[in-house]
């Protein structure tokens, strides 16, 4: 599993997918989320504005990333 460090309180799910390199564009992220292909902490999430905080885990097509807080 890959760790993605953020330096803010949270990052929105669609932005996280792009930032982590799980998709190319925001439009692609939106489509993947709305299609129910993204798992947020083990459950399907269709809210692209879902706030991801340190400790949260996001999965897409067999790739998993965990959000980590930066110091």
Image (cartoon, helix red, strand yellow):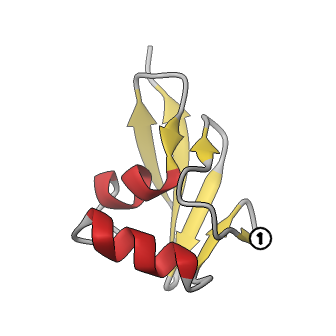
- The relative height of residue 53 versus residue 35 in the rendered view (above or below) is above
Left/right of residue 4 with respect to residue 69 in the rendered view: left
**What residue lies at 45% left-to-right and 22% top-to-bottom?**
8
Q: Residue at x 43, y 79 (%)?
A: 31
Question: Which residue bears the numbered disc 1?
Answer: 43
| Quarter of the view holding residue 4 | top left
Task: State the residue in front, 55 or 30.
Answer: 30
Q: What residue is at 61 percent from the left and 36 percent from the top?
A: 53
Give residue 48's position: percent from left, percent from top. 53, 59
**From the viewer's perspective, is residue 6 above or below residue 59?**
above
Residue 69 screen position, x and y as percent: 51, 27
Pinpoint residue 52: horizontal percent, then vertical percent.
59, 43
**Dividing the picture into quarters, in which one does residue 46 lie?**
bottom right
Which quarter of the image is occupied by the C terminus?
top left
Left or right: residue 18 compared with residue 45: left
Disc 1, SS: strand
Residue at the outermost right position: 43
Q: For mark 1, does the 10 Å Cα neighbourhood hold few (<14), some (14 to 19), or many (20 or more) residues?
A: few
Q: Which residue is drawn at the image coordinates 46% and 48% (left, top)?
A: 3
């Amino acid at each position: 599993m890959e760790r993605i460090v953020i330096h803010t309180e949270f990052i929105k799910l669609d932005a996280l997918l792009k930032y982590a390199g799980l998709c190319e564009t925001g439009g692609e992220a939106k489509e993947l989320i709305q299609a129910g292909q993204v798992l947020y902490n083990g459950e399907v999430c269709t809210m692209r504005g879902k706030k991801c905080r340190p400790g949260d885990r996001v999965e897409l097509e067999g790739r998993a990333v965990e959000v980590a807080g930066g110091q």
